[in-house]
Image (cartoon, rainbow, N blue to C red):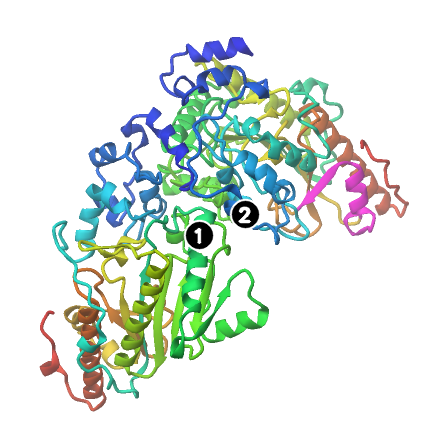
Amino acid sequence: MPFGNTHNKLKMNYSAEQEYPDLSQHNNHMAKVLTPEMYANLRDKETPSGFTVDDVIQTGIDNPGHPFIMTVGCVAGDEETYEVFKELLDPIIEDRHGGYKASDKHKTDLNPDNLVGGDDLDPNYVLSSRVRTGRSVRGFCLPPHCSRGERRAIENMAIESLASLDGDLNGQYYALKNMTDDEQQQLIDDHFLFDKPVSPLLLASGMGRDWPDGRGIWHNDGKTFLVWVNEEDHLRVISMQKGGNMKEVFHRFCTGLTKIESLFKDKGHEFMWNEHLGYVLTCPSNLGTGLRAGVHVKLPNVSKHEKFGEVLKRLRLQKRGTGGVDTAAVGGVFDISNADRLGFSEVELVQMVVDGVKTLVEMEKRLEGGQSFDDLMPDQK
Amino acid sequence: MANNFARILSGKRNVGIMSLVGAGSLTAAFLLNREHVTAGAQVRRVYPASADYPDLRKHNNCMASHLTPAIYAKLVDKATPNGYTLDQAIQTGVDNPGHPFIKTVGMVAGDEESYEVFADLLDPVIKERHNGYDPQTMTHPTDLDSNKLKSGKFDERYVLSSRVRTGRSIRGLSLPPACTRAERREVEKVVVDALAGLKGDLAGTYYSLTHMTDQEQQQLIDDHFLFDKPVSPLLTCSGMARDWPDARGIWHNNTKTFLIWINEEDHTRVISMEKGGNMKRVFDRFCTGLKEVERLIQEKGWEFMWNERLGYILTCPSNLGTGLRAGVHVNLPKLSKDPRFTKILDNLRLQKRGTGGVDTAAVGSTFDISNLDRLGQSEVQLVQTVVDGVNYLIECEKKLEKGQDIKIPPPVRK
């Protein structure tokens, strides 16, 4: 179990070989990288808050993975995890993030004026637009490892800061444990409410402990800006609206985030960030921007085309069902979003989505008209 | 007891008790006297106890009933010599608020010393769960002499099968919620080595969950022997399912009447079972098998966790004492519909379950009937309770068949 670092020392009574996990049936990034030698090197280390390599990899041991889908198999318990266990995490980051090297620098750009276009995605096809990211508060342990006291402190900081937002960002916080039945139903109807995670990928890391203590949802009155508190990360920030005006969604996203960051700074807190990894989050797959910009878009014809996968790959886009990750598409409507997180700035990623979705909609219209879209095939971005 | 500890400390093993953290090795020798059990390393804390105290307002389990802020503050900075903490012990009870009708225990032990270091919480929990048994003043009787059992052969027109189970923990190794992979593998090795020494009608084979073939797996499923990765959040939240299926397995004798689970909820679960109503033979084999296994592990310098306060030490406080559940699958079509059925069972200190075990429903009118108690009564006493109780139930059923009336028996004990 993660929290409670004193117990970790017990392992040192046994040799590294005796403790090394059986990864023979496993297919995840952690299992690919963690050799017995690496385990022996890392197992006596711990971060200042007491997080060990065994804590990092527990979720990857408990979830051997899937032949087709490569999960990460690791989590961070605090900011220092990425430093203390870099021998393990750097190669995983490189493999997961398209060859991103230990010496690479990540560019952060949250200036929405740098986005070209994006206000004109065809609403006959693009049903909704959304941008999400995560933020961690420096100095506090992350959800797999935090104590109840730390988690509550994060919640209090979030409540205080969000209460200061005004104008079109004026809103309200709903703590999961105090919600009335009416409030709960409304949040479900708005598709805002998050539930206790059931995925063993998440639960095995320890992030579901003490549910629903310290968890909640904040949203603005206009229901276009939403913050999740203490789910998989300290904060998840979401900007969304119906239709295809990604520019407006991204503008609100950047404005809101920047405001929240300065409100935290006023109270002497900052977000976890460094120039190599960008924004630091619980899962190594969300480093860098932590950003997923996506649309729900009708592509009944394109999605059945044999080149669909290739098109997405070249555009650096990813498809999901309309329920989000690990769900199926319903009625030809797909969730299309950026595949990358690290090594590209926020503006660059949203630009890829905007340009890529435009191309996909063009292709859909061609197929509707019985024509081919071969001349529209993009180059590999 | 001091002799045994000296033997263990000088035994052939290089790991385990010899290398307990800090003052731990001396601690082991003084386990019987609570006052001498020193905590291990101080827990590193960022917040005061009041900031970390769990929100238990919606909870209904034994831990929540007894964990006051004062007790939490007193215990939260302590750890066992192995480093196991209160927060870890109570995590399952925090994560599983409970049910208005069913009161779960809500905490586990990570090692033998948990029951000492966290006694301020565990003693009242044990007292509530075990019908007033006070670990501070009472002693638990252990009696595995199956010759003492009287009239243990049931009418097989009613009793379909008979079964006795218990658990045993290997002293010096952490329990499933807390054990490291190496410790768990050591438990597997110690037990499998011992079982390989069983002979005669106890001779058998071990099937490791990791290495089982598809055919072996199917056979074990067909025999109703195979256990699966736990899905109940009561269990998974305690951390006992980590690293599944590493070092887990099933051993059974060739005649399929004696079965041992390794590293499921406890280090070992020991089960003796047969079709039919010969509880005497089931209990004979249970006792013989258990004593043989104990002898075989002692030859290698190991022993079971046991003390006279709490009897056999297991992961869940509900299984302390004997850890014993002796039960039958019995057909009681008329009695089970009688409104006095529940009261009769209560007075006989018996419990009914469905034929799938705990938290399942009965199929038709066949029930799993077993002893309610675990601690404060010996194995012989508990099995006798089941024998006498089930015989009474069968008598009731026969009377109802003949149109005669039945009586609620007086309570067999307090």
Q: Place residue A362 in its image quadrant.
A: bottom left
Is any atom of residue A330 visible in this view? yes
Q: Position of residue B236 (x, y in %)?
A: 48, 45
In terms of image quadrants, where is residue B162? top right
* Magenta region includes residue B294: no
* Residue type, mark 2 in image: Pro
Labels 2 and 1 share a subunit: no
Q: Which numbered disc covers residue A151?
A: 1
Q: Pick the residue in front: A99 or B401.
A: A99
Q: Residue at x 28, y 29 (%)?
A: A16
Looking at the rendered structure, the secondary structure element under dot 1 is: helix
Residue A301 vs B8, above or below: the answer is below
The chain ID associated with circle 1 is A
Q: Which quarter of the rendered picture does the C terminus of chain B lie within?
A: top right
Number of callouts = 2
Seen from this angle, which residue lies furthest bottom? A369
Question: Start and end of the magenta stretch?
Answer: B335-353
